[in-house]
């Protein structure tokens, strides 16, 4: 095929090679560009030889390149599509549309491409120079991962509320449920839909990942309902989280007062007292204790939660003998001449008067919470709107403090261990998912090994939950300013004694701001 013939040269193709024969000098390589644009199928490879041929005009036939195919087929690596690039001019395409289309179909057949051919594109949408997608496979639709939802427990965020008659301390505390109540659900993963490659082969979908429902099998049942796995309570009680699993705890409801009619209460579970606790009586429970009388309690012997929280809506008039303790947190409206000891935090809505308070952190309402008289001991921080009073009642605040660098190292070690346990957990889950694929084809020994792996997985989940709780506790402590903090939101009166670590400060005037220990010095930031 001759591309160009003039008085200077002949440009032609032979066996897909491109040759030039130059008879007369005077034709530059730049003048050749318009001709090459008219014939996109020419690919120059020997530019130096072309220049020399034009300069020398020896009349010899010189190879300068090769001829690209009119239709250049490109098959995607995943065999989900194929495109074509036309190496011809617009005029050539118009004049040879059907020939080009037949050539493309021939090329597709030689590559065993039979699925998803876009005939409409081949007939009407072919373009020169650009790649045009002419074949599309059917993509596999990957499965959707399982979706797990659990009962949302009430946030234990107390607040002082006013109803027009009196203010009271309120919060969502115990979430009571009845047998059969909804506690959670899982929408199982889907398998997805198969696709098809352009070569006709099946494209397998990726199955959605499953997720395990974490629940206490003694108190919660998993039931298949309408294509979902629903968690329902097996007993009446209160919703708990035990080492990361949702569970129902035993709940004792006293529909009145604790007193002569009930005797002292000692219960393995959570206790709700709708009334109050009469003088000299006690309530002890392994889990949470909630006392809902707006009048609070007076002169009780003891209220003790061995593993949970204590909430007293109306506060305490202790008369110097009442002892309130909780393994976790204590929430009270006010504390008047009593002893409060918490393994976690103490939250006071209104005031503490002449009381002994001991906890990790101690908080009062930021706008009107008061600490007046008594001894307040905390590990990390104490925050109150007002400390002391105008009568200059002696108030002692003692923050034990901590070593921030050591605590940061402990946090880092905890996070590293947490991440390694998560990685180990994912590895075991993948192994169990693989074993599930061959369920029914394993022997007794392999089945036993699977059961052992499941037990190991449960232990890991427990360890991860415990590490996460430790992480939260350390981060809560690190939120303190410096290495121990006392914040006074409104004012602290004279004769207030502050101690953070071994650093002491006795106030001699009204003060507002934050005291904190850092680098063995007591620092103060004043509030405007």
Image: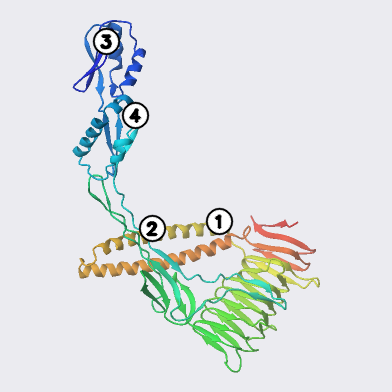
Percent of width and height locating residue 34: 35, 17
Q: Earlier in the sequence, mark 4 or mark 2?
A: 4
Disc 4 element: loop
Element carrying mark 1: helix
Task: Looking at the picture, tell me which residue is in the foreground, 162 or 202.
Answer: 202
Q: Answer with mark 3 or mark 1, whichever residue precedes in sequence.
A: 3
Q: Is residue 417 above or below residue 174?
A: above
CA gap between label 1 and label 4 equals 65 Å
Would you name the residue on which mark 1 appears? 405
Residue found at x 22% / y 34%: 102
Q: Quadrant for the C terminus, please.
A: bottom right
**SS category of the residue bearing label 2:** helix
Judging from the image, what secondary structure is the residue with disc 3 in?
A: strand
Q: Which residue is mark 2?
A: 423
| Quadrant of image for the N terminus | top left
Q: Residue at x 28, y 8 (%)?
A: 8
Q: Nearer the viewer, mark 4 or mark 2?
A: 4
Q: Which mark is residue 9?
A: 3
Judged by depth in the image, the label closer to the viewer, 2 or 3, is: 3
Q: Which residue is labeled 4 in the image?
A: 129
Viewer-nearest of labels 1 and 4?
A: 4
């Amino acid at each position: 095929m001759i591309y160009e013939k003039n008085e200077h040269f002949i440009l032609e193709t032979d066996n897909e090679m491109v040759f030039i024969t130059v008879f007369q000098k005077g034709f530059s390589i730049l003048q050749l560009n318009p001709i090459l644009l008219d014939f996109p199928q020419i690919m120059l490879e020997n530019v130096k030889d072309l220049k020399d041929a034009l300069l020398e005009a020896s009349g010899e036939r010189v190879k300068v390149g090769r001829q690209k195919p009119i239709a250049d087929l490109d098959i995607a690596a995943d065999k989900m599509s194929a495109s074509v690039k036309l190496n011809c001019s617009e005029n050539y395409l118009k004049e040879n549309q059907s020939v080009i289309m037949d050539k493309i179909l021939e090329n597709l057949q030689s590559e065993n491409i039979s699925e998803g051919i876009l005939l409409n594109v081949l007939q009407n949408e072919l373009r020169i120079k650009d790649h045009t997608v002419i074949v599309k496979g059917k993509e596999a639709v990957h499965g959707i991962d399982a979706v797990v939802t659990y009962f949302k427990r009430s946030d234990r965020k107390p607040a002082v509320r006013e109803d027009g008659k009196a203010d009271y301390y309120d919060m969502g505390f115990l979430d009571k449920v009845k047998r059969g109540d909804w506690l959670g659900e899982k929408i199982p993963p889907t398998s997805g839909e198969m696709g098809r490659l352009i070569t006709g082969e099946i494209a397998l979908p990726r199955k959605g990942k499953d997720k395990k429902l974490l629940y206490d099998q003694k108190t919660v049942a998993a039931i298949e309902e309408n294509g979902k796995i629903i968690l329902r309570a097996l007993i009446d009680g209160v919703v708990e989280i035990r080492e990361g699993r949702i569970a129902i705890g035993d709940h004792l409801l006293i529909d009145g007062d604790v007193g002569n009619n009930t005797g002292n209460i000692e219960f393995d579970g959570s206790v709700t007292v709708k009334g109050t606790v009469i003088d000299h009586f006690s309530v002890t429970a392994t889990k949470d204790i909630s006392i809902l009388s707006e009048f609070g309690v007076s002169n009780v012997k003891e209220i003790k939660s061995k593993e949970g929280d204590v909430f007293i809506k109306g506060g305490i008039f202790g008369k110097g003998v009442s002892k309130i303790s909780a393994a976790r947190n204590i929430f009270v409206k006010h504390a008047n001449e009593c002893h409060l000891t918490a393994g976690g935090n103490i939250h006071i809505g209104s005031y503490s008067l002449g009381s002994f308070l001991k906890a990790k952190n101690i908080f009062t309402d930021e706008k009107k919470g008061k600490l007046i008289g008594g001894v307040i001991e905390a590990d990390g921080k104490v925050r109150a709107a007002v400390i002391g009073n105008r009568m200059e009642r002696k108030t002692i605040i003692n923050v034990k403090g901590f070593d921030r660098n050591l605590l940061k190292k402990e946090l880092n070690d905890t996070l590293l261990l947490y991440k390694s346990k998560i990685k180990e957990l994912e590895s075991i889950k993948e192994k169990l998912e693989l074993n599930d694929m061959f369920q029914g084809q394993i022997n007794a020994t392999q089945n036993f090994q699977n059961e052992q792996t499941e037990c190991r997985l449960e232990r890991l989940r427990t360890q991860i939950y415990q590490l996460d709780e430790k992480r939260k506790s350390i981060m809560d402590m690190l939120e303190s300013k410096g290495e121990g903090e006392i914040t006074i939101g409104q004012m602290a009166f004279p004769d207030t004694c502050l101690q953070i670590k071994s650093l002491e400060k006795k106030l001699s005037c009204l003060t507002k701001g934050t005291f904190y220990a850092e680098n063995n010095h007591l620092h103060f930031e004043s509030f405007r």
